Image (spheres, rainbow, N blue to C red):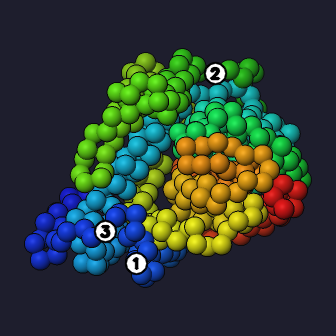
Amino acid sequence: MKKSIWIFSIFLGIFLLNPAVASAAGGEVESIGATLPIFFCIPFLGMLLCIAICPLAAGEWWEKAKPFVVAFWSLAFIIPFAVFKGADVALEQVLDAVIGDYITFIILLFGLFCVTGNICFEGDLVGKPKLNVLLLLIGTLLSSWIGTTGASMVMIRPLIRANKWRHRRAHIIIFFIFLVSNMGGCLTPVGDPPLLMGFMWGVGFFWSLHILPIMLLNTVLLLGLFYFMDKRAYKRDVEDGDKPGKPKEKTPVHLTGGHNIIFLAMIVLAIILSGMLPDIVPFFGREVKIYGEVSLTVASIMESVVILLAAFLSFKTTKKEVRVSNNFTWGPISEVAVLFIGIFITMIPAILILEAKGSSLGITQPWQFFWCTGLLSSFLDNTPTYMVFFATAASLGLTDGSLIATSLGMIPQVILAAVSAGAVFMGAVTYIGNAPNFMVRSIAEENGINMPSFFKYIIWSVSCLFPVFLIDTILFFL
């Protein structure tokens, strides 16, 4: 992996510094997408197809070649883009995606992954349908307060341990992704990054509680469907002779590594303060220039430092035995780190085109905002997608209904709810819709659970989630 990173860096540096391709950027950065041909999105589609097909067609090769595939598709976008728009623009856009988005993204995931890996729920948990429903419900409720990634990493391992005696388990993990890794994060800015961006743009911290009725309805519908499916699967497992092993002595349910909740709170507090401090103390809003318009605020740098410190202290203060009990490995976070840097780079043209042309799409109704934001969030990063449609809603100048004052303008409450729900809920439609999806899948496969492929998972999500989203549309957004 290190070798491929060096090769990628050398090729990128040589190309961008070549005077033959370097040229001054023309026009404002925001206008780049207006003239960018759609074929620049081909590398992004290539990345998605590789993620979907390669694990099935060439599994062993894929495990070794991921970094090289990421480098190939990244260069397949960067080089033509540099020729078309100039090396300065290409470098600025790549740095913005990598430094401004990817690094802060992966540091947050890394911190949560490390801290939650040192928290272990132990005890006599037997994976019967009612217990599974309870664990899913607890995880869903936790997601808005410690983030979808935090809740996913805390709850996935107890759920897997409780069901390790069963053969039919993939559906349990799929519904876990639906509820804990996505829908549960809709109630606070801590829950999911798009809502944090809304908070930074003036939306009240507890405004997202307006989405509570939608979340409760969806949770009831999905848990009801899950209970029906899990009950059938449980009966078939028992009929096939699957039985939970009897422990030598009863062990009450307890928490090991509970002191790590302090470090989890550090991370959550760092996220909240990074959005609030720049408005309270101007120093934290100062920008540290990286290149061109690429910069980081002092608050975002401090957020990353606090997160890394929390991860370091968590490892220093927790016994190795806790991680052994959790079957903790670096595999899931490594896979996310490698694949998502390619996704962040290759989706640059899609985001630029969306930013330039989003307001001309003729989207004015709440149901349109819900589905457009949601479907794009299923494949693109949901934060910039949320930002585009948030800005689009603010630019419409609508005055009907209850309005929310934001730094970009007034937005009708129902449209803001549609944008927020679409960005958060429909991240569950694909494995790449939200980072915890991929991490949960990787942890499940490490523990011997045969998860559906990329396309089969989409069939699951469309079958189970789209009927729920249609109900949402009829009841809340029409």
Residue 35: image tag: 1
Instruction: Measure the alpha-carbon separation of dots 1 and 3.
Output: 11 Å
State which mark lies toward you, 1 or 3.
3
Location of mark 2 (residue): 255
Q: Is residue 274 above or below residue 16?
A: above
Measuring from the top left, give residue 249's x and y in whole percent. Answer: 73, 21
Query: Does the residue at mark 3 contact the one at mark 2 (Cβ under 8 Å)?
Result: no
* Left or right: where 235 falls relative to 88: right
Identify residue type, mark 3: Gly
The amino acid type found where label 1 is placed reads Thr
Mark 2 touches mark 1? (CB < 8 Å): no
Query: Helix or strand or loop: what does disc 3 sit on?
Result: loop
The quadrant of the image that shows the N terminus is bottom left
Residue named by callout 3: 27
In this view, the residue in front, 223 or 171, is: 223
Distance of mark 2 from mark 1, alpha carbons?
A: 56 Å
